[in-house]
Amino acid sequence: MTTATSGQSRRWAILIAIGVVGGLLSGIFAIGGGIIMVPLLTTFAKLNQRVAAATSLAAIVPTAIMGSIAYLVAGEIDLVAGLFISIGAVVGAIAGSALLKRIPLFWLRWMFIVFILLVAVRLVLVAPERGNTLQFSALVALGYVGLGLGMGVLSGLFGIGGGIVAVPALVGLFAISDLVAKGTSLVVMIPTSSIGTAANWRAGTVDVRAGLLVGLAATAASIPGAALALALPARLSGILFALLLVAVAAQLAYRAIKSQGASAKSIPARSLADEE
């Protein structure tokens, strides 16, 4: 076996492993998996940040479809809620991407980190109840659209999957079962990730081969992930999701500190340029 062939096989194995991790998390927690897959793709697959994010988003499309099917078969999806949330999420994602270039993110980022940590604390202290249903009304529909807008904006601003926001919001604000919240979140990811992937495809930022390998592995892994989510007790599921939120908050905090450091270094450089 040549060195080139060995290196290619190793890269394929890395991409498949990343897909398995992302797929399991997607099935268990109904998140896109990008919050985990992007840093893994940049660290181990050596993709740059932009290509890693685009490739991860492409891999989410089949993963979300397969995960949604698993939850649908179990009767744990609210399709009406998913429709209204998707409408808001698509509009919100476009707005978030536009706002990214116009507003300072420093305080917004830290407020969001605090919000995530508060949600994590609530999930630990208050166990989600299963079997709850919400009577549909015009006000509830507006609430779903508003939730979708929030998901989309945060996704556009911070590059996080909507499930990080949708699942706790559906459980805490709409009193929906955590399993239905997860299944509905996966349904919402299908149109939003598809639209994002189409845009990235046109921009040429998707590594097609890597996306196929990661996507196939993630799709296969999402099925046992969803089965595990359905089997987990509500209390344990809430605690595990809270731990995931803490990990997300830590990653966002790291990005914020790193970004602040880079900005601080650039200020003296600009001052010197001005003096010259």
Image (tube, rainbow, N blue to C red):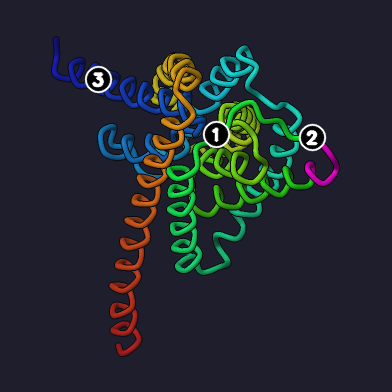
Q: Which residues are magenta?
A: 136-141
For marks 2 and 1, the one nearer the N-term is 2
- Residue 194 visible? The answer is no
Q: Is residue 106 above or below residue 17?
A: below
Estimate the spatial distance between the alpha carbons at disc 1 and disc 3, rounded to whole Å: 24 Å
At 43% from the left edge and 14% from the top edge, which residue is drawn?
224
Name the residue carrying label 2: 135
Estimate the spatial distance between the alpha carbons at disc 2 and disc 1, rounded to whole Å: 40 Å
Q: Secondary structure at mark 1?
A: helix
Estimate the spatial distance between the alpha carbons at disc 3 and disc 2, rounded to whole Å: 53 Å
Q: Nearer the viewer, residue 256 or 274?
A: 256
**Circles 3, 2 touching at the beta carbon (< 8 Å):** no
Q: Nearer the viewer, residue 84 or 140?
A: 140
| Mark carried by residue 8 | 3
In the image, which is nearer the foreground, mark 3 or mark 2? Answer: 2
Name the residue carrying label 1: 201
Amino acid at dot 3:
Gln
Q: Main secondary structure of the magenta part?
A: helix
The quadrant where residue 95 appears: bottom right
- Residue furthest to the right: 138
